[in-house]
Image: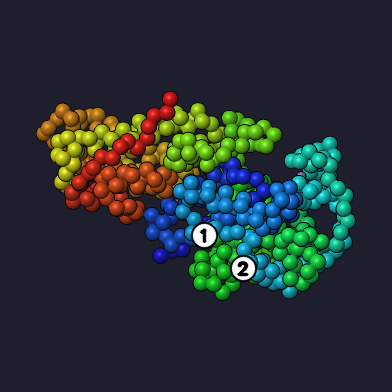
Amino acid sequence: MVKYYITTAIDYVNAAPHIGHAYEKILADVLARWKRINNYDVFFLTGTDENAQKNVQAAKETNITTKKFVDLNSKKFIDLCKKLNISNDYFIKTSEKRHFEFAQLIFKKIYDNGDIYKKKYSGLYCVGCEAFLTEKDLVDGKCPDHNKAPKLIEEENYFFKLSKYEKQILKLVSSSDFIIPEGWRNEIVNRIKNDGLKDISVSRPGVEWGIDVPIDKEHKIYVWIDALSNYISALDYPNGLKFKKYWPADAHIVGKGINWFHSVIWPALLLSAKIELPKHIWVHGYVTVDGKKISKSLGNSIDPISLVDKYSVDIVRYTLLKDIPFNQDGDFSEKSLKERNNNELANDLGNLVSRTLSLCEKFYSGKITKQKDDGLFKELDLVKINKYMDKYELHNALEEIWKFIRITNKYVNDKEPWKNAEDRELVLYNILEAIRIISILISPFIPETSDRINKQINVKIGTIKDIKFGLQKEYKVEKEGILFNKIE
Ligand SMILES: [Zn+2]
């Protein structure tokens, strides 16, 4: 079996999950599930970034320990994964003791390689960002994200020689498929060409929460080495069996806001630590809500958990995947969700399954034996679906699957098996085979629905290999409710 290691970014725990977090996890989940039905040995990682200094303050405000605070908030992301039917193989919390050891090991390796040095530094520090900003980042002298003037602070920090890797990184990101899609690749290439790479601070002095710098207990490891190394500490770098089997990552799925960290800083750290580089950084756009960017001040941060409770997990998954193309920003609205539910899910898919099973029960008590191929199956363009999936164009792959669902519906209408007794069993067998195959194809996207279909047509979960006509010798179907209710 060929291995496939896929990760999401790890989320900050200082705020509750919103629809953007849900979107990224669903994307990665579809890809992980798709690889699994294509017979890959998949390891799928997600988790939370728990070592930010903001957590200390937030915990104090609620009168609990910082550890308790990050555990409580991390649990919301764990719950989100369960709610969304995310098939991650592991959920890493960076406050785990073992992650501390790995992050320190990597820091030490980079230090031993001569790429970390201490220097006095003064700069404009934004507490909200927990980062130094440059004059260029400011709008009217303020951090645009926090609407606050940064403080000028001077301190001694450890720095990583990012500049040393400029040539290697530029070559890496210029290659055609390291950063995908192209638009976000160009952004990074141009930024390196224009601004070059400057050394970055990798420690924070005098803070209480986080991972000790292994060579100096007065400092904690700053976010880069701490957070990014989660991708290998989850595999028990360097001696763990998982590390040997799954590293390098095949795809880091990240939002466009952290493209730079994953495409530039992370590979440079790995080069210095002499660890193999990940194969692809897949960058996705942002989810807007009703045309507006998600923000606290607008109060438009939709809670994905209550959305799933209100509708269903698969309606939410389907709408996000369909409305936000992988290479662009996209808008989420409940209006679109309702339309997609009523048309594509309830009408196209739900109706197909429901009326087919009713006919099987009415005329054959649910028992249909194998019949010859009536030509419906050749309408399925699996090559095209594969091509879209390889390019991570999940919305196009879904559209192609739905084309086949609509063709199958048209076949039912044309053949009128409720009226024509003559070739009724032949027609119903052909439709059931189509439904079985559709169920395999939708399983990465809307897995719960796929399970419900399989249960009703009484087949086991299939893989891509099972997408051929005539595999099922006999069907014994049993209708069980309807897949999607219409929403007013
Ligand atoms: Zn800020």
Q: Quadrant of the N terminus?
A: bottom left
Residue 287 rendering spot, x and y as whole percentages: 58, 38
Residue on which the image places disc 1: 90
Q: Residue at x 67, y 58 (%)?
A: 67
Q: Is residue 304 above or below residue 336?
A: below
Residue 256 is left or right of residue 156, and the answer is left
- Mark 1 or 2 closer to N-term? 1
Task: Specify whether 6 is left or right of 482.
Answer: right
**Element carrying mark 2:** helix
**Label 2 near label 1: C-beta < 8 Å?**
no
Q: Amino acid at mark 1?
A: Tyr
Instruction: Find residue 301 and report its horizontal and vertical position in percent.
Output: 61, 37
User: Which of the 4 image quadrants contains residue 227?
Assistant: bottom right
Q: Residue furthest top?
A: 488
Residue at the far left in the pictured view: 422
Residue 141, given in percent of the width and then of the height, sits at 85, 39
Identify the residue shown where x is 73% and y is 74%.
112
Report the label total: 2
Label 2 within 8 A of ligand 1 by Cβ = no
The three-letter code of the residue at mark 2 reads: Arg
Viewer-proximal residue, 174 or 343?
343
Instruction: Give the residue displayed 51% in from the left and 72% down from the top.
Output: 241
Residue at image mark 2: 98
Q: Quadrant of residue 352?
A: top left
